[in-house]
Amino acid sequence: MAGGGPHGRLERRSSGELESEVLAALWSTDRPLTPAEIQVEIGGTLAYNTVHTILRRLYDKGLVRREVDGRRGAYRPAKNAAQLTAEAMHEALDRGPDPIAALQQFVTGLSPEEERALRELLSGGAA
């Protein structure tokens, strides 16, 4: 019996993990991908219907755009990875009771390279 989980079952990935994998596949190319192409790109372990369901969820969230070519639909990301990450950071700051304290904690965890880039950005330079 194949699998990496208990009792030989394959580990189930959360919907968030699956959405991230699909977005990563879309970000890896400049052209729209069909569900079948995405299925191959992420390793072919997911059923086509699962990939299609994930794409529908991402579309409903406004994270992908659907382009129709005849009967065939292809998808492209609505935002790049940096934009999506920045939005998540803003949302996290907005949820907390003390965004300044959260920023202080965030900054203390930066690598030296990240800290240099942040300093350049804050001083008006390009990172």
Image: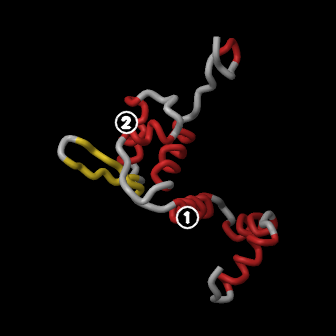
Residue where numbered disc 2 is placed: 52
Left-right relation of 63 to 116: left
Mark closest to the chain's N terminus, 2 or 1? 2
Q: Residue at x 42, y 35 (%)?
A: 51
Up the image or down, 86 lies above or below 67; here it is below
> Which of the 4 image quarters holds residue 90?
bottom right
**Toward the viewer: 5 or 91?**
5
Location of residue 106 in the rendering, given as x and y in whole percent from the top left corner: 74, 64
State the residue at coordinates (69%, 12%). 7
x, y (%) of residue 38?
Answer: 43, 41
* Vertical order, 119 against 84 (above or below): below
Give the farthest residue toward the left: 70
Q: Which residue is mark 1?
A: 82
Q: Is residue 48 left or right of residue 88?
A: left
| SS category of the residue bearing label 1 | helix
Query: Looking at the image, which is closer to me, 48 or 81?
Result: 48
Q: Is residue 2 left or right of residue 61?
A: right
Label 2 residue SS: helix
Q: Nearer the viewer, residue 105 or 5?
A: 5
Q: Residue at x 65, y 82 (%)?
A: 121
- The three-letter code of the residue at mark 2 reads His
Side of 31 where 110 appears, left or right: right
> Circle 2: is it few (<14), some (14-19), or many (20+) Cα within 10 Å?
some
In the image, residue 36 above or below residue 94: above
